[in-house]
Image (cartoon, rainbow, N blue to C red):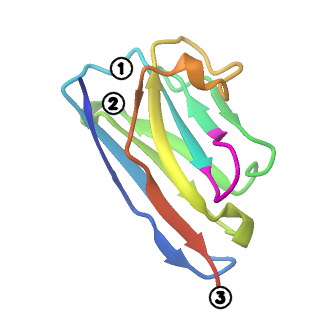
């Protein structure tokens, strides 16, 4: 069973930026797709972004396009989520996830993912 360490969350003012990281251990993940999900209070968890193993397939939810950027560093078994121009509606617990799939089509389907991080809080507020 892999272990995940998520970091980079916290409190930021509207318009600010944060960079989330999720590092995995105990599993070779070069062939896995990574994704970020988020869950706001009282709402269902939703897919935010996905990047496949080679990094050639990348998807974003419409709500974050142009503001968020996903990347991965296979040598470190780590995925990143650069979040810019943050809005109060981005407030949520963010989760990283990995799934043994080639591309990121239909990436928001939770059943596609085999392992999940523990979640990290992001709060956007003045």
Q: Decide which of 86, 112 is in the foreground and name it.
A: 112
Report which residue position mark 2 lands on: 74
Q: CA distance from mark 1 to mark 2?
A: 6 Å
Q: CA distance from mark 3 to mark 2?
A: 36 Å
- Image quarter of the N terminus: top left
First in sequence, mark 3 or 1: give its number.
1
First in sequence, mark 3 or 2: give its number.
2
Query: From which residue to which does the magenta span run?
Result: 39-48
Position of 12 relative to 7 (above/below): below
Q: Residue at x 65, y 88 (%)?
A: 126
- Across and down, in percent, residue 55 comes to 52, 26
Q: Main secondary structure of the magenta part?
A: loop
Report which residue position mark 3 lands on: 126
- Across and down, in percent, residue 70 comes to 55, 43
| CB atoms of marks 3 and 2 within 8 Å | no
The stretch drawn in magenta includes residue 46: yes
Q: Is residue 17 visible?
A: no
Q: Which mark, residue 30?
A: 1
Displayed quadrant of residue 106: top right
Q: Residues within 10 Å of mark 2 (few under 14, many from 20)?
A: some
Q: Decide which of 26, 74 is in the foreground and name it.
A: 26
The stretch drawn in magenta includes residue 125: no
Position of 11 relative to 118 (above/below): below
């Amino acid at each position: 069973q892999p272990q995940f360490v998520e970091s980079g969350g916290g409190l930021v003012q509207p318009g600010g930026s944060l960079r989330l990281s999720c590092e995995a251990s105990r599993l070779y993940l070069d062939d896995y797709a990574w994704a970020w999900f988020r869950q706001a209070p009282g709402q269902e968890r939703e897919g935010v972004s996905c990047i496949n193993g080679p990094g050639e397939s990348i998807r974003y939810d419409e709500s974050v396009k142009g503001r968020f950027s996903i990347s991965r560093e296979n040598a470190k078994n780590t995925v990143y989520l650069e979040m810019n121009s943050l809005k109060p509606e981005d407030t949520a617990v963010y989760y990283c996830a990995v799934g043994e799939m080639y591309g990121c089509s239909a990436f928001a389907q939770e059943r596609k993912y085999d392992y999940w991080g523990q979640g990290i809080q992001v709060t956007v507020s003045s």
